[in-house]
Image: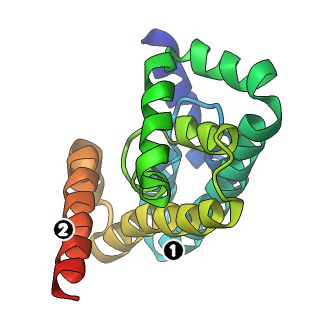
């Protein structure tokens, strides 16, 4: 855990440099395929420092995450045996890998959407999407929607409520993401029942 804490602190330090925006893009890219610290940490720090740029930071984060997700997909598609297995084993995600395979078999795009929005390790889903040869266009569209929703939600909250919301987001983000996902799924179930 000490190494993760040091990585977390290292990520946060970029908010205090003139390279915060490029660092946010790179962090979002790397986290979607192999890096352990989520980009939300730097996104929040940057947005709190300049709330009027919160949407710009959310856009940068979304773009980096989408491209990083595509890189994770490529790892799974072309290099699962050489690189993907090593990443999954490094994080101890072997059981999750087989579980995700079963989820893809049953729910396809829903799995990507939920993983892209919630605190579930997105990198597992990007790599496995490629390994299981999930339709790439569906992967890109759903990743774009779910990752953008996640990061723009943070941007909207910080833009509207300013720095005071940071403590609330830090403390309750995982719970809020899960609740939002449940409400979203219930909304789709309701629509399906009504139609």
Along the viewing direction, whichever of 46 and 124 lies nearer the viewer: 124
Q: Name the secondary structure under disc 1.
A: helix
Point out the image quarter for the N terminus: top left
**Where is mark 2, residue-wise?**
186
In percent of width and height, residue 119 lies at 37, 43
Residue found 37% across the figure and 73% down from its top: 156
At horizontal 53% and vertical 46% (from top left) the residue drawn is 39
Instruction: Give residue 83's mark.
Output: none
Q: Does the image show residue 108?
A: yes
Relative horizontal placement of residue 190, taking residue 154 as reference (left or right): left
Q: Nearer the viewer, residue 96 or 1?
A: 96
Question: Is 29 or 53 nearer to us in this picture?
Answer: 29
- Alpha carbon distance from label 1 to label 2: 28 Å
Q: Position of residue 26 (x, y in %)?
A: 71, 47
* Badge 2 density bin: few <14, some 14–19, many ≥20, Cα 10 Å: few
Dot label at residue 55 = 1
Quadrant for residue 138, please give it.
Answer: bottom right
């Amino acid at each position: 855990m000490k190494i993760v804490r040091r990585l977390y602190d290292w990520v946060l330090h970029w908010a205090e440099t003139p390279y915060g925006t490029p660092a946010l893009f790179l962090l979002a890219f790397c986290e979607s395929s192999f890096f352990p610290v989520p980009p939300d940490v730097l996104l929040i720090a940057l947005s709190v420092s300049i709330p009027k740029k919160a949407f710009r930071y959310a856009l940068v984060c979304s773009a980096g995450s989408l491209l990083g997700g595509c890189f994770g997909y490529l790892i799974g598609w072309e290099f699962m045996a050489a690189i993907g297995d090593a990443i999954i084993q490094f994080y101890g995600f072997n059981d999750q890998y087989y579980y995700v395979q079963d989820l893809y078999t049953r729910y396809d795009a829903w799995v990507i959407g939920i993983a892209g929005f919630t605190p579930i390790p997105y990198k597992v889903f990007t790599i496995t999407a490629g390994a299981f040869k999930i339709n790439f266009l569906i992967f890109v569209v759903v990743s774009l929607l779910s990752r953008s929703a996640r990061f723009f939600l943070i941007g909207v909250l910080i833009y509207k409520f300013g720095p005071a919301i940071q403590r609330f987001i830090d403390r309750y983000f995982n719970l809020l993401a899960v609740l939002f996902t449940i409400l979203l799924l219930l909304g789709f179930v309701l629509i399906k029942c009504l139609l």
